[in-house]
Amino acid sequence: RSWQYQVSGKLATAQVLVDVKAEHIKSGGPMGMKQEAIKHILRHKPDDTFYMVDLANVQRMFKAWRAAMPRVVPFYAVKCNPEPGILKLLVAMGAGFDCASKGELEMMLRMGVSPSRIIFAHPCKRPSDIRYARDHGIQYTTFDTVSELHKIAQINPDFKCVLRIRADDPDARVPLGLKYGAEVSEAPILLRTAKELGLQVVGVSFHVGSACQNLSTFSGAIENARKVFDEANSLGFNMELLDIGGGFTGHFDECGNVMFGEIANTINLALAANFPPEMGVRVIAEPGRYFAETSSTLLTPVYGQRDRVAADGTIKKDYWLTDGLYGSFNCILYDGQNPAYKVVRSPLMPEQADSTSFSSTLWGPTCDSADCVYKDVTLPVLRNGDWLMWNNAGAYTVAGACDFNGIEFTTPGKLYVWSDSAVDVAEEEAMHA
Ligand code: PLP
């Protein structure tokens, strides 16, 4: 099905591969389509949290990935953002999926994804999740302990097991190695245990940490994976799968091109050196942030405020936003994000003449005083009904929200758009705290 948008007086048509509800944005204004979509949201949904989800950016990321790393099939990490539009688009484009629980497996199977396109990539699974996977034909899973091997042997000895090794980038924003990944030196005992239990070990996986900073971490991890492959092959296992995990960031340059070349080159070279194509090893990855981050723009209205007089007599402002740490801004606590914002004036009120700035605190909407998004940031005077806009808000935001205080953080309003250009919303620099 295709959507049509009237932008700057001309009609833009986008081919839509997925079955999601589209809203038509009509405008004759001089702005890009996303800005028109934002204006539409502000005019029609004036008082609650809202997401604009740009599915075209997900498609751009997918195409860039396939072009840059044709050997590596992306299995999207559903946990990063199980947004149905994103999932359906990725299904249609042929991605695989990394699921971490029964709930995620169920979600993908219900969308008609074949179990062969899923990896149950959790090294320490709950027994009931293993039973569910077994009963629904999920074949591949990861492990990194002797205890997990015993659990698998008891519940689903037919699993194709992938040994997750530790591969930390010390500068990754969210390191994962403290919790998951066996040391390479532990591989022999794990492999021998699997042999004794009659299990099939078929591959190696790793995760360098989310938002990886050092490309060399990937090369080192791929080299280590090869060592474990050799060890396993020598024990008689039939090793066929390398899973290079997640950790990728996906951003656009100022021309709207995906910036992915450097990391892809590094990985391609390391694969060629350690897993030449003639070895016949299938290579997959588990990117989450890469696909999800630039897909979404979060819009939060200001709905309450007060002035406070500091000890030195200066006035400080407090503002209440409809979203907070229990909602999308859990990303500040759990994902180490420092989300950037822009002030967007309400189109329903007269222009704001007062350009004075104040030290301001942004509170979330729950009754918890710990629910503070940013403290003492400099902001122009905001009115109730003005908005803050947060770009690149698609990764580890709403996915980690809960409905504390009965506030529907997990089900914000949303509008799918299909942008003509990835640089549509880029205007002046956004502000960080
Ligand atoms: N795979 C596993 C096992 C993970 O734990 C995660 C994130 O925590 C991912 C993939 C996705 O990582 P990223 O979003 O950094 O690509």
Image: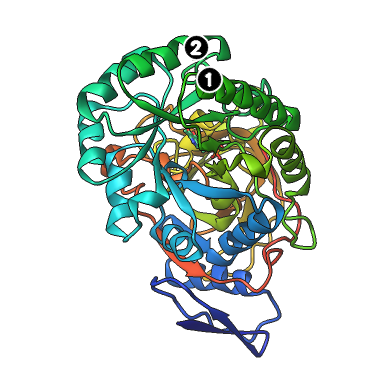
- In front: 361, or 317? 361
Q: Residues within 10 Å of mark 2 (few under 14, many from 20)?
A: some
Q: Is the shortest distance between ligand 1 and the CB of mark 1 under 8 Å?
A: no
Q: Amino acid at mark 2?
A: Pro
Q: Secondary structure at mark 1?
A: helix
Q: Which residue is mark 1?
A: 234
425 above or below 383?
Answer: below
Q: Residue 164: image x %, image y %?
A: 49, 25
- The three-letter code of the residue at mark 1 reads Ser
Image quadrant where one finds the N terminus: bottom left
Measuring from the top left, give residue 305's x and y in whole percent. 48, 45
Residue drawn at x 43%, y 48% as measured from the top left = 97
Q: Which of the two discs, 2 and 1, labels the residue nearer the N terminus? A: 2
Q: Residues within 10 Å of mark 1 (few under 14, many from 20)?
A: few
Can residue 324 be seen from the camera position used here? Answer: yes
Whether 273 is drawn above or below 295: the answer is: above
Kindly identify which residue carries mark 2. Answer: 188
Q: Comparing marks 2 and 1, which lies closer to the viewer? A: 1
Which quadrant would residue 83 be assigned to in this image? bottom left
